[in-house]
Amino acid sequence: MAAKRPHEDAENASHDAKRGRKGFTVGPANLPDGTHRRKVQKIKKDLIHKAKLKRSYARLKEREPVPKPATYTKPDSEPDEPASLELHPARQAMLDAPEEPQQENRKNGSGDPKRQRARKPKPVPFEREARQAQRRKEEAQARREAYEESNRQRQQKLDEREKFRRAMAKARTGGRNGQRKLGRESKILLERVKRVVAE
């Protein structure tokens, strides 16, 4: 009878036992050479270094136990003196002083100016942008007002010109006998001259 073939799993298990542990991986295994791979290798080296440091520190700790820090203890040579119940003179003077003025100052908020903290103004987010936007709004408003004013003046001049044209046309029409009305025409021309001189 032929010999049985050994299982592949059993062979791999014995082979892995011979090789020992594989180690650990950091990052993906298929990184190309370059910045990312060097970064991953650096992280792995740092982790190994830290593990070695911890191991060596643990070994040192096992060999030499760390002494506990000494706590303060009173020497037995000094006799314990009972604490006196008298208050310090400055403290006694402070207690004897009247308390009402201090409380009033605190209530009114007019205490010592050194003790009062100057509050910083609350920070306004996008303050500079808000100022610029406000300035642009004001400029646009000024341009709009100037445009409306120029339109109003233009319309006023057009109305005056139309009024003058109608008045002149009316004055040039002939009277009953076909003659021009010089009285009306002269008044209109006089007004026109006054307006031109005023400008």
Image (tube, helix red, strand yellow):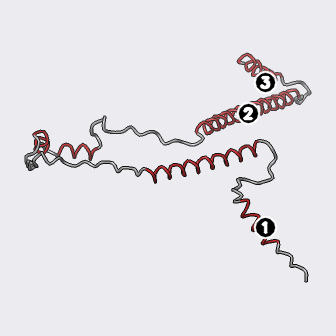
Q: Amino acid at mark 1?
A: Asn
Q: Residue at position x 84%, y 29% from top?
A: 165
Q: Nearer the viewer, residue 10 or 43?
A: 10
Label 2 sits on a secondary structure element that is helix
Label 3 sits on a secondary structure element that is helix
Pick the quarter of the image with the C terminus: top right
* Residue 164 x/y as whole percent: 81, 28
Q: Amino acid at mark 3?
A: Ile
Q: CA distance from mark 3 to mark 1?
A: 122 Å
Label 1 sits on a secondary structure element that is helix
Q: Nearer the viewer, residue 54 or 15?
A: 15
Q: Residue at position x 73%, y 33% from top?
A: 147
Q: Would you place residue 146 above or below residue 33 in this image? A: above
Quarter of the view holding residue 192: top right
Q: Amino acid at mark 2?
A: Tyr
Q: Which residue is mark 2?
A: 147
Q: Is residue 14 left or right of residue 120?
A: right
Pick the quarter of the image with the N terminus: bottom right
Quarter of the view holding residue 16: bottom right
Q: Which residue is mark 1?
A: 12
Q: Residue at position x 76%, y 19% from top?
A: 190
Please identify, in this view, whether the residue under mark 3 or under mark 1 is nearer the observer.
1
Quarter of the view holding residue 109: top left
Looking at marks 3 and 1 on the same chain, the residue that comes earlier in the sequence is marked by 1
Q: Which residue is mark 3?
A: 188
